């Protein structure tokens, strides 16, 4: 334990604190002394006990106000986190839907390519048959004209 000399309301006090907490204790005491002095200047000399009580009440009031603001900010952050999670979920759902759509379109494209290939093969086959038939007709026509 460390001992710290502090000054409060123009009086010296020796207080103990954990090692390493000396500066913190000095700063807290200065803050309390300042608040106490401000109230003393404002209210006059109404007695040390009453002034200490009013100072303490004001500090507790400030503490509770700050605590409430922190709670409100935490709630806002929690709400934002919830909205972010919902938004993320919607984005994933949208992406999954688009991925499914793309997959379906790719399947349709593959079917279309297959149909085009089959049509090309059929077209080439018909063209070959037609060409052969025409060649036959031409050969028959030439043969017939030679015979006459």
Image (cartoon, grey):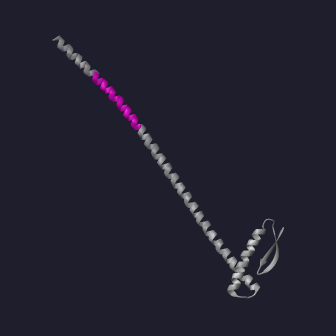
Q: Residue at x 38, y 35 (%)?
A: 115
Which quarter of the rendering shows the N terminus?
bottom right
Provide residue 43's location: percent of width, then percent of height.
Answer: 69, 87
Q: Depth check: give the residue in front, 145 or 4.
A: 4
User: Where does residue 49 sit, x and y in percent of width and height?
Assistant: 76, 84
Instruction: Return the x and y of residue 137 as percentages of the image width and height.
Output: 23, 19
Q: Main secondary structure of the magenta part?
A: helix
Q: Quadrant of residue 112?
A: top left
Q: Which residues are magenta?
A: 111-131
| Up/down of 133 relative to 118, above or below | above
Above-or-below relation of 148 to 23 = above
The residue under the point 22% across, 18% down is: 138
Q: Work out whether 39 lies above or below 67.
A: below
Residue visible at 47% across and 43% down? 103
Q: Residue at x 80, y 80 (%)?
A: 11
In the image, 84: left or right of 115? Answer: right
Q: Is residue 89 magenta?
A: no
Of residues 55 and 130, the one drawn nearer to the viewer in this rendering:
55
Is 124 on the left or on the right of 109, as rendered?
left
Q: State the image quarter where residue 106 is shown.
A: top left
Q: Quadrant of the C terminus?
A: top left
The residue at the far top in this view is: 147
Quick one: which residue is furthest to the left in this view? 148
Horizontal side of residue 137 vs 107, given as left or right: left
Give the mark count.
Answer: 0
Left or right for 128, reference 8: left
């Amino acid at each position: 334990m460390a001992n710290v000399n502090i000054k409060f309301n123009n009086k010296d006090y020796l207080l103990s604190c954990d090692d390493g907490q000396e500066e913190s204790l000095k700063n807290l005491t200065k803050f309390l002394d300042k608040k106490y002095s401000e109230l003393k200047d404002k209210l006059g000399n109404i007695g040390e006990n009453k002034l200490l009580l009013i100072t303490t009440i004001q500090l507790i009031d400030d503490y509770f106000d700050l605590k409430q603001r922190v709670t409100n900010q935490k709630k806002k952050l929690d709400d934002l986190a919830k909205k972010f999670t919902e938004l993320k979920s919607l984005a994933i759902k949208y992406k999954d839907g688009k991925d499914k759509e793309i997959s379906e379109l790719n399947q349709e494209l593959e079917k279309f390519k297959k149909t085009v290939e089959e049509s090309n093969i059929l077209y080439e086959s018909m063209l070959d048959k037609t060409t052969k038939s025409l060649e036959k007709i031409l050969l028959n026509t030439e043969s017939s004209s030679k015979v006459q």
